[in-house]
């Protein structure tokens, strides 16, 4: 059993109201339980919502609104689910300011070498976090 970014399972929870289903994740779903999570929704943000990016230690929406608290709240909710279910691994959406694993994007599409808010918190608590790009392609 693993946590999985809900958008990778076809749930329309991305900032733009869309999803990012991937064949590798959907194939994996037929083999094991994947618990869908969307940290940004769990943090109280609506879908659709403004795109956001890191600015220093803060997460800021395109309008300039600071949404750091929402991102942190959602990350803690995901961590709570992991603890509740005894989950030690997550598959999270690469590039997301919440879920990115080693790289996230700013609003101009530039890659920033760092973990998303949720990924960072999960790793600090000993969880293994991978992105959909780390799954085998078959």
Image (spheres, grey):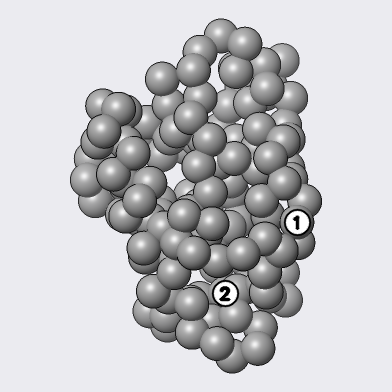
Q: Nearer the viewer, mark 2 or mark 1?
A: 1
**CA distance separating discs 2 and 1:** 17 Å
Quarter-of-image position of residue 86: top left
Pinpoint residue 129: horizontal percent, then vertical percent.
41, 39
Q: Residue at x 31, y 46 (%)?
A: 79
Pinpoint residue 113: horizontal percent, then vertical percent.
50, 63
Pinpoint residue 105: horizontal percent, then vertical percent.
62, 66
Pinpoint residue 42: horizontal percent, then vertical percent.
47, 55
Quarter-of-image position of residue 117: bottom left
Q: Nearer the viewer, residue 31 or 103?
A: 31
- Are there few (<14), some (14-19), or many (20+) residues within 10 Å of tag 2? many
Q: Quadrant of the N terminus?
A: top left
Relative to residue 122, is residue 53 depicted above or below?
below
Q: Nearer the viewer, residue 22 or 134?
A: 22
Q: Is residue 67 visible?
A: yes
- Are there few (<14), some (14-19), or many (20+) residues within 10 Å of tag 1? few
Q: Residue at x 63, y 26 (%)?
A: 25
Q: In the displayed structure, does residue 135 sit left or right of residue 79?
A: right
Q: Which mark is residue 17?
A: 1
Q: In the displayed structure, does residue 46 sit left or right of residue 3?
A: right
Q: Nearer the viewer, residue 49 or 94?
A: 49
Q: Which mark is residue 53?
A: 2
**Residue extending farthest top:** 31
Q: Earlier in the sequence, mark 2 or mark 1?
A: 1
Q: Is residue 114 visible?
A: no
Q: In the displayed structure, does residue 10 sit left or right of residue 93?
A: right
User: What kind of element bears circle 2?
Assistant: strand
Q: In the displayed structure, does residue 14 sit left or right of residue 80?
A: right
Relative to residue 46, is residue 76 depicted above or below?
above
């Amino acid at each position: 059993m693993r946590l999985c970014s809900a958008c990778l399972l076809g749930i329309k929870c991305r900032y733009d109201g869309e999803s990012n289903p991937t064949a590798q994740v959907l194939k994996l779903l037929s083999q094991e339980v994947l618990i869908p999570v969307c940290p940004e929704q769990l943090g109280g943000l609506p879908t659709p919502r403004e795109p956001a990016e890191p600015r220093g230690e803060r997460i800021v929406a395109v309008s300039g609104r600071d949404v750091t608290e929402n991102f942190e709240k959602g990350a803690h909710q995901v961590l709570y689910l992991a603890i509740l279910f005894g989950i030690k691994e997550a598959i999270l959406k690469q590039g997301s300011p919440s879920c990115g694993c080693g790289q996230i994007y700013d609003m101009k599409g530039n890659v920033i070498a760092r973990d998303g808010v949720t990924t960072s918190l999960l790793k600090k608590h000993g969880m293994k976090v991978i992105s959909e790009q780390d799954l085998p392609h078959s």
